[in-house]
Amino acid sequence: MKHFFLPFFIACVQLAAAQNYLTCLNIPDSLKQNANAIVRWDQTDIDIHSQRNMDIRKKRVVTVLNETGMAAIDAYEPYDKRTHVRSIEATVYDAFGNEIKKIKKKDFRDQCILDGVTLFSDNRVVYLDYIPTQYPFTIVYECEVQTSNTAQIPRWRPMGHYFVSVEKSLLQVTCPQELGLKKQEHNFSNFNIKKIVEKDTQLSYEASGLLAQKEEYFSVNYNKIFPWALLGLEKFNLEGVDGTAKTWKEFGKWYAESLLSDTEELPDATIAKVKTLVGAESDPIKKAKIIYNYVQQKSRYVSIQVGIGGFKPMLAKDVDRLGYGDCKALTNYTKALLGAVGVPSYHTVLYGDHDKIDMESEFISVQGNHMILCVPSDTEYYWLECTSQDVPFGYQANFTDDRKVLVIKPEGGEIVKTQNYRDESNTQFCNGTYKLTTDGTFSAKIQMDSEGSQYGPKYHLEHRRPNEQEAYYKAFLSHINNLKISKMTFSNDKESARFTEKLDLDAIQYATITGNKMLFPINAFNRYDGNIKRIRNRKTDFEIQRGSYDKDEVIVELPTGFTVESLPENVQYDSKFGQYKTEILKKDESTLIYKRTFLLKKGYYQHNEYEAFRLYMEQIAKNDNAKIILNKI
């Protein structure tokens, strides 16, 4: 009787508490500060009945204060043939707790993960598409999901967004002892979080009064600030296959044998074709480049993340026939083609994102949202992004670079760090000339060569429409009024991952004429004019995830009939954030040479260092706008 009464009593107390959250009138002022929405009640109950059976029940009560807060509702559930949405509903209340609308399962949107691709018709998502008529309002979202995929237990994130407060968040997990329930906690110490129960068969947390956090300029990834817990089992089921893993080596071996084997078969005609393409080439990396180019020409990417659309990749022969696939499918297809010409390679699972997110190397579990291919050589690993039709062989910057990943080898899994692009290798070299006329008009030629992480945002320019290219450069050179671009040419050296831009420019009234004086900024091209916001009492640390190195050399031809009255001073700023240096040389009476170097260092910095960083960048912006004064003879 005691075992029945206690959970029944707790459930009654929680139900009564949840009812108090329907009105907006009793929200503490502290929770409203900096908030676009307030999570009034967020309860997740995870019941793991066996290695192949898990129920997840959610109840989420959110008061939305404005349009920006709509994202905090989080009312969506992906499902497939192994995951079923048993029930899902929502009820909307006004500020006084009066019911406005009840939304049943049939009223939720239900669609294929990717419309138009029938291959993934079993992989769907059901989600709430509610358009409010007033703010604030409160929404109660409830759902129950059943799945056999016990390898992927939802993470507990009591705070999932900036500018969102949390009044109460609860997690309750039950599990048979023999499955080996495990957890890894992150950032609990700075928040009001209580561990209610921790046993071999049960785990429960409670978080309360979590105040909305501002997303400050250059804020670190929220995984490094907000509290969250990673959950897993030592004995699990994935894609209908039981697994056991206590080490990454065990996990990788199981993954390779259970989910990746028997997926690489190719048609004989395709094998013969790629062997002909490779010909007599014997160098494995050169052969890999030929195959990679073949995949880029033949296939296209459809966006399905790891864990959505299954973990087992689509068969290589199907990708060969259809010409498209997701990251898993295209990686597996490329691996099969490489195997056909005698080049070994390994599936690699990771978090693909502009933010650098590591696999949690001390917690063996299903992780990641993306798959790439690892090609070993005698001295290094080459990492292939198989979803892109134009990224160079082995190029990683800005999406899969400098992070811990899981390489799945035949003998087992291994955590490896991907390529780190050093600050000095993320270059933009700018060479140019510009000439001023007596009325302040200038004409210019400029060449910029970009490599490393600065190559990534540039190489796609050659495939854009002319009006899009022009809009890009007018934004990049927005400090030049009346800008006209008469010529644009591009060169994409994919072998060395170097992108070259050549521009011919004109602008009237670049210089300002006042009486007998002419004033103009000597740095006409590569100027930093960003405004680093002043933040008093900054709370969070900040991070520069990728450094860069710019080097400029520009010849300036002065107008006839003018002499130099004053030049900006040569400067050099050195700090822990980087180095900046400018130099102006007088070639002759009518010609100047302007030189500029700017190294920005990547790094993780404490919140109390932010003001020094802001002042450093402010100095650079000020100097980049320094002006020459000329006198008319």
Image (cartoon, rainbow, N blue to C red):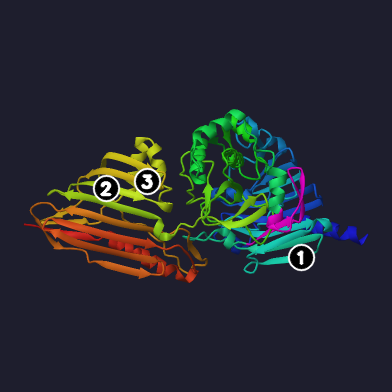
Residue 272 at what x, y percent from top left?
A: 56, 31
| Residue count near mark 2 (Cα–Cα under 10 Å), binned few <14, some 14–19, many ≥20 | some
Residue at image location 59% in from the left, 39% down from the top: 326
Q: Is residue 185 at least partly visible in the picture?
A: yes
Local packing at callout 3 (Cα closer than 10 Å; few below 14, some 14-19, many 20+) is many
> Position of 410 compared to 201: left or right?
left
Toward the left, the furthest residue is 633
Closest to the camera, between mark 1 and mark 2, is: 2
Secondary structure under badge 1? strand
The amino acid on which the numbered mark 3 sits, given as a three-letter code, is Phe
Q: CA distance from mark 2 to mark 3?
A: 14 Å
Circle 2 SS class: strand
Q: Is residue 50 left or right of residue 136?
A: right
Magenta residue span: 227-250
| Residue 150 sits inside the magenta stretch | no
Query: CA separation, marks 1 and 2?
Result: 64 Å
Q: Which residue is mark 3?
A: 499
